[in-house]
Amino acid sequence: MQATIKWVDGVMFVGETGSGHAVVMDGPPDHGGRNIGMRPMEMLLLGVGGCSSFDVVQILQKGRNHIVNCVAELTAERVDAVPSVFSKIHLHFIVSGKDLNPATVERAVKLSAEKYCSASIMLGNAGVEITHDFEVIEV
């Protein structure tokens, strides 16, 4: 895996991945930014949510569950020191579908958390407290 970060101006950067996708990162005005892109730590949080969501959807689809939507709402806390690392991350999954068994959704969330999601497992191994819960919505 490869990525390139290019400085644009002030504290704005463009990150480009080896797959050819790009994203703008910027800081708030009080740190010299123009607030036109995500913060790097927000991107890290999105990475955890995206990685976990990918797993949950894949596990449920492979089990032939009829899901129509999966939303992960993430909340995070950071320490009040430099570096301001994450201390806690909570993922709340809202999975919508037809005839979904809550135990099956719970198993998918647990498998992602404990076995498959590289991003959350890596951060958990670094001392971040990562928690999960879910709700099922019948459609």
Image: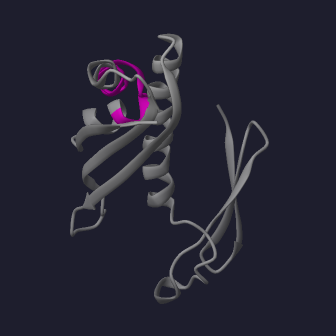
| Side of 49 relative to 76 (left or right) | right
| Side of 68 relative to 112 (left or right) | right
Q: Percent x, y for residue 14? A: 70, 61
- In the rendered picture of this protein, how many numbered marks are placed on residues? 0
- For residue 136, above or below residue 106: below
| Side of 49 relative to 133 (left or right) | right
Main secondary structure found in the magenta portion: helix
Residue at (41% x, 21% y) in the render: 116
- For residue 118, above or below residue 132: above
Query: Based on the displayed image, in which of its 4 quarters is residue 119 positioned?
Result: top left
Residue at (61% x, 70% y) in the render: 37
Q: Is residue 126 visible?
A: no
| Side of 1 relative to 103 (left or right) | right
| Most foreground residue, 56 or 41 | 56
Q: Percent x, y for residue 62? A: 52, 12
| Most foreground residue, 66 or 26 | 66
Furthest residue to the bottom? 30
Q: Is residue 108 visible?
A: yes
Bounds of the magenta segment: 108-120
- For residue 41, above or below residue 61: below
Query: Based on the displayed image, in which of its 4 quarters is residue 84 positioned?
Result: bottom left
| Most foreground residue, 3 or 136 | 136
Residue at (50% x, 60% y) in the render: 40
Residue 118 is inside the magenta segment: yes
Q: Percent x, y for residue 131? A: 22, 40
